[in-house]
Amino acid sequence: MTATSPRIAEIHYLVELAKDWTVSCFASAQRSEFALAPHRFELTETGVRRRRVKPGSLEAVSPLDRLVDRPDPTAWSHGTVVTLLVDSGSRTSAVEQEVVEILAVDGDLVLAEAAVVIRIPGLPPCLGAFGALT
């Protein structure tokens, strides 16, 4: 498969669409308590279909664990909390950070990007820039 194959172009398109939708959700947030609802984006023969995923479900918490041979390219946008280990030389501390993940799958091809959520009391949350997960 070459880097210009239709599969790669389709999955990149889904990732960009999911990122744009996610950024617009944060941009229109009015409350500091705003939480991103998990969504699935499916590329079908008739276009892209966006569906809300039930919060707390396995698919919402860990989309890649819920895969069952999806026939079409699929992407997910969901919020999660990750634990970062910070090494200060003499000790290691754990810090929790809220992030938004965009995960996309097409067969054996997987793309993942994440952005940090910044919360300041009394203000709507701010979403940082997306970057590829490696």
Image (cartoon, rainbow, N blue to C red):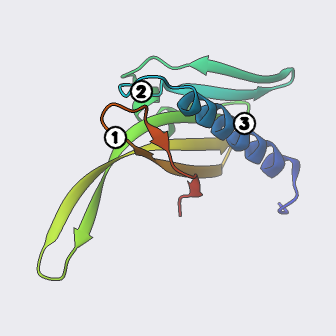
| Residue positioned 50% across, 40% down in the render | 64
Given residues 98 and 30, the one toward you in this image is 30
Q: Do the residues labelled 2 and 1 touch (CB within 8 Å)?
A: no
Relative to 86, residue 129 above or below: above
Q: Which of marks 2 and 3 is in front?
A: 2
Question: Residue 132 lies in what quarter of the image?
Answer: bottom right
Q: Is mark 2 on a helix, strand or loop?
A: loop
Neighbour tally class for label 1: few under 14, some 14-19, many 20 plus, Cα within 10 Å = few
Q: Mark 1 points at which residue?
A: 120
Q: Which of marks 2 and 1 is in front?
A: 1
Neighbour tally class for label 3: few under 14, some 14-19, many 20 plus, Cα within 10 Å = some
Q: Earlier in the sequence, mark 1 or mark 3?
A: 3
Q: Is residue 69 visible?
A: no
Q: Earlier in the sequence, mark 2 or mark 1?
A: 2
Q: Name the residue under label 3.
A: 17
| Residue positioned 53% across, 64% down in the render | 134
Does residue 126 appear to the left or right of 93 in the view shown?
right
Q: Which mark is residue 48?
A: none
Q: Is residue 57 visible?
A: yes
Q: Earlier in the sequence, mark 2 or mark 3?
A: 3
Q: Residue 35 carries which label?
A: 2
Q: Is mark 3 on a helix, strand or loop?
A: helix
Question: As shown in the figure, which amino acid type bears the numbered disc 1?
Answer: Ile
